Amino acid sequence: MHEVSIALGMVDELFRIAKENHAKKITLVRLKIGKMSGIVTDSLKFAFDAIKLEHPLLSGAEILIEEVPLVYECSDCHVSFSAEDIYFPACEACGSRNLKLVSGEEQHIESVEIEV
Ligand SMILES: [Zn+2]
């Protein structure tokens, strides 16, 4: 499962953050996951919940995942809009397919709350 390796990578980063801040515990982790990232957020949450139990530093942490919608900007009329369609999006205003993806590819740790 793709999401397990992503969760493991994020856990490594969380440990680094915890160490830098001399944290005793991580209490809350907010993740931003774009719709375009290909990550299934339920699977990611599941993987995290399984991994965190192995680490006292992380075991009490709540994992919140924010799904970031796809936002495109039209290169022809410069309108920005969010779209559900990953494969054949078209501009809401002019119908152009000449679009630039503005957000939706995120896969990162947005913020972390710790106990020191
Ligand atoms: Zn347009």
Image: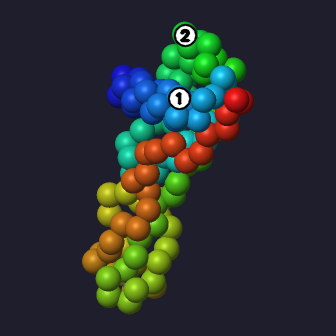
* In the foreground, 80 or 115: 115
Task: Pick the quarter of the image with the N terminus.
Answer: top left
The correct choice, above or below, for 64 with respect to 55 in the image is: below
Residue 3 visible in the current orientation:
no
Expressed as whole percent of the image width and height from the top left, the position of residue 23 reads 63, 28
- Between circles 1 and 2, the one closer to the viewer is 1
Expressed as whole percent of the image width and height from the top left, the position of residue 11 reads 48, 27
The image quarter containing residue 101 is bottom left
Residue 15 visible in the current orientation:
yes
* In the foreground, 109 or 72: 109
**Earlier-in-chain disc, 1 versus 2:** 1
Task: Pick the quarter of the image with the C terminus.
Answer: top right
Residue identified by numbered label 1:
19
Residue identified by numbered label 2:
54
How many labels were placed on the picture?
A: 2
The correct choice, above or below, for 49 with respect to 83 in the image is: above
* In the foreground, 25 or 74: 25
Kind of residue indicated by mark 2: Glu
Image point (43%, 51%), residue name? 106
Label 1, label 2: how many angstroms apart (C-alpha)? 17 Å
The image quarter containing residue 18 is top right
Identify the mark at residue 63; answer none if there is no mark: none
The image quarter containing residue 28 is top right
Disc 2 residue: CB within 8 Å of ligand 1: no
